Image (spheres, helix red, strand yellow):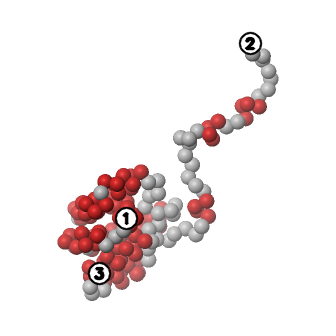
Amino acid sequence: MSKNTSSSAFRKIDVDQYNEDNYKEDECGESQSPPVGPDEKEIINFLNQYPFIKNSIEALKTVLRNAPISSRNQMVKDAALNIVMQVLLSVKSAQIEEAVNALDRDQLDILMKYIYRGFETPSEGSSGQLLAWHEKVHAVAGVGCIVRVLTDKKRV
C-alpha cells in the first residue's frame, strides 16, 4: 500500500510540454528582417512593357520569388495578394500554360497558394480566370502540389 506523503513536487511538472500534438510556431523566424513582399512598381513596369507574354512571365516569377510567406504582417500579405492577382488576371487564357511551364516546383506551390487565397476573396471575373490557372498548375504539378499547399502551415 502506498504512503500518504505531503510532497507536491510532481505537480510542478508541465506534462503537456512533452505532448507531441502540442504545436508551437517557431519564434526564431521573425527575428530576421520581415519580408516586405514584391515591389509593385517593378511589377507594373513588367506588365506595361511591349513583349507582353515574356514580361508577364517575368513579373509572375518576380512576384512568386518575393512572396512574403514567413511574414506575420497581414497587410503585407494582402498587398502581395493584390499584386499577384493583378499579374494573374492580366495574363490571357491562351498564355497561361506557357507561363506555368516556365515555373519551377516551389514557384508552382506558391502560385497554388495564391490561387486558393484568390478563391477566398473573389472579385468580378476572377473566379473563372483562377480556375483556368488552377487547371494548368494541376496539370503540370499534379495532386502533390495541392496536398503540399493545403498541409503547409505558412500562408500567403
For the point 56% across and 52% down, the residue is 25
Disc 2 residue crowd, few under 14, some 14–19, many 20+, Cα 10 Å: few
The label number, if any, that marks residue 62 in the structure image:
none
Q: Earlier in the sequence, mark 2 or mark 1?
A: 2
Residue 127 appears left or right of 16 = left
List the residue tagged with mark 2: 1
Labels 2 and 1 touching (C-beta < 8 A): no
Tell me if residue 3 comes above or below residue 144 in the rendering: above
Q: Nearer the viewer, residue 44 or 9?
A: 9
For the point 31% across and 84% down, the residue is 48
Tell me if residue 116 comes above or below residue 99 in the rendering: above
Q: Earlier in the sequence, mark 2 or mark 3?
A: 2
| Amino acid at dot 3 | Lys
Q: Secondary structure at mark 1?
A: helix
Q: Residue furthest bottom?
A: 50
Tell me if residue 94 comes above or below residue 47 in the rendering: above
Q: Nearer the viewer, residue 39 or 139?
A: 139
List the residue tagged with mark 1: 105
Tell me if residue 47 comes above or below residue 27 in the rendering: below
Q: Nearer the viewer, residue 52 or 139?
A: 139
Q: Earlier in the sequence, mark 1 or mark 3?
A: 3
Q: Nearer the viewer, mark 1 or mark 3?
A: 1
Q: Position of residue 5 (x, y in %)?
A: 79, 21
Q: Quadrant of residue 52?
A: bottom left
Disc 1 residue crowd, few under 14, some 14–19, many 20+, Cα 10 Å: few
Q: Secondary structure at mark 3?
A: helix
Cα gap from disc 2 to disc 1, whole angstroms: 63 Å
The label number, if any, that marks residue 54 in the structure image:
3
